[in-house]
Amino acid sequence: MLINSPKNIALFNAILLALISGVILILISIYVESIDITIIMVIIAVIFISSFFLINFSISKFFHEKIDIIYKTIGEPQTTMKAEKKNKNSNDVLDLVNQVVLRWSEEKKQEINELKQMASYRREFLGNVSHELKTPVFNIQGYVDTLLEGGLEDKTINVKFLQKTQNSVNRMIALVEDLEEISKLESVNLELNVESFNLYELATEVIDFMEQKALLNKTKIIINPIASKSIKVLADIRRIRQVMINLIDNAIKYGKMDDPVVTISFYNFHDNYLIEIQDNGIGMPEENLVRVFERFYRTEESRSRDKGGMGLGLAIVKHIIEAHRQTISVRSNLGEGTTFSFTLKMA
Ligand SMILES: Nc1ncnc2c1ncn2[C@@H]1O[C@H](COP(=O)(O)OP(=O)(O)OP(=O)(O)O)[C@@H](O)[C@H]1O
Ligand SMILES: [Mg+2]
């Protein structure tokens, strides 16, 4: 018998008391002959039953008072233990409490780690935002100061400096818009306007929209010729347009110097379509791939080309795809090109 619950302790002690009192009574009966053996048996039974109930009651009360304090401290109802007891079919009260407390401490440890991670994430985010804002703000300050200090009259620089100021202002506007977008995506559950539409048509529309940028970079954007012209998906068309624009924008921006080509392909993938946007551009080293979807992350290669991105586009894209309960991934080879693939539900 395991002494691991008030009932077992009470039983053990009641047996012990009954045995001791039985021995004493038998010894007495040897000297006092008038005591009947049935009376002795009755007395032993009474001692056994009353001590069992008394010990059980007082130990249970003591245990439950203490355990109650533990449960109140960890904020779990006593019912947790009852459920656990049923579940494990165990009578070992202390062992059950121990397990609940251990689980609670594990959960707390995890929560603390998550909070720490969030705090460092927030710090990094603020640092990034101020860093990104600093460059255009200081540029604007420099141009305006020069113009006010006589540059306005100097025909060789006045228009050029105003244009540069305009570029910096545009960059700040783009940053603020992206920040607004990303905080909206992160703070509320993104509400999707899901409908059935033809992704092939959307892709041609986006190619049209990106035409100017592609021309400037001498980039050819094509849809894989083997693709069917009817790619019916269930998704939020406005958001998917945003995804396509961001991915194609990157493919152009980080494209090859000569003969850059961006290819859009669609593949059947179980109940989904797999959409790939592939470029033959500068690519990324393997170790950067896990981080490209982080806010403000840019690879050294893109920085050295001074492409002026802020590293928010892919973070936005990932949010949108995950809000559709779909996935996005990337593969890339440095100097050879990059392919972004995401899935969408077939209509
Ligand atoms: N097609 C690509 N080829 C090579 N590198 C890429 C490609 N797409 C993204 N990257 C790398 O991933 C980084 C993050 O991309 P992301 O779209 O989030 O930011 P960005 O294009 O730099 O700026 P933004 O999109 O906010 O204007 C880029 O800075 C670049 O280093
Ligand atoms: Mg981008």
Image (cartoon, helix red, strand yellow):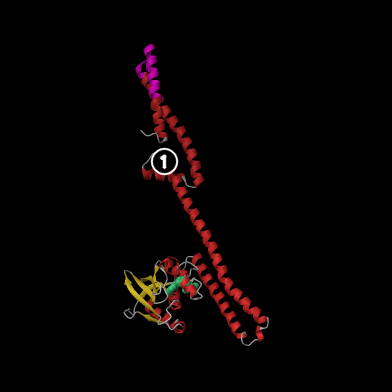
Image coordinates for residue 299, horizontal then vertical, percent = 47, 70
Q: Does residue 313 show up?
A: no
Residue at 39%, 29% (x, y): give it: 12
Residue 267 in the image: above or below residue 90: below
Tell me, yes or no, if residue 55 can be seen here. Answer: yes
Identified at 49% across, 46% down, the residue is 74
Residue located 41% across and 31% down the image = 10
Q: Secondary structure at mark 1?
A: helix
Crowdedness near tag 1: few (<14), some (14–19) or many (≥20) residues, C-alpha within 10 Å: few
Magenta segment, prevailing SS (helix, strand or loop): helix
Q: Is residue 78 above or below residue 39?
A: below
Residue sitting farthest toward the right: 149
Ligand 1 closer than 8 Å to label 1 CB: no
Q: Amino acid at mark 1?
A: Asp
| Magenta stretch holds residue 69 | no
Q: Give the residue pinned by disc 1.
A: 95
Magenta span covers which residues?
17-38
Q: Quadrant of the C terminus?
A: bottom left
Q: For the N terminus, which image quadrant?
A: top left
Indicate the position of residue 14 as horizontal and vertical percent values: 40, 27
Q: Quadrant of residue 283?
A: bottom left
Count of labels in the image: 1
For the residue pair 118 and 157, the one nearer the viewer reads as 157
In magenta stretch: residue 21: yes
Q: Residue at x 57, y 68 (%)?
A: 130
Q: Position of residue 57 (x, y in %)?
A: 45, 33
Residue lying at the far bottom in this picture: please name it. 155
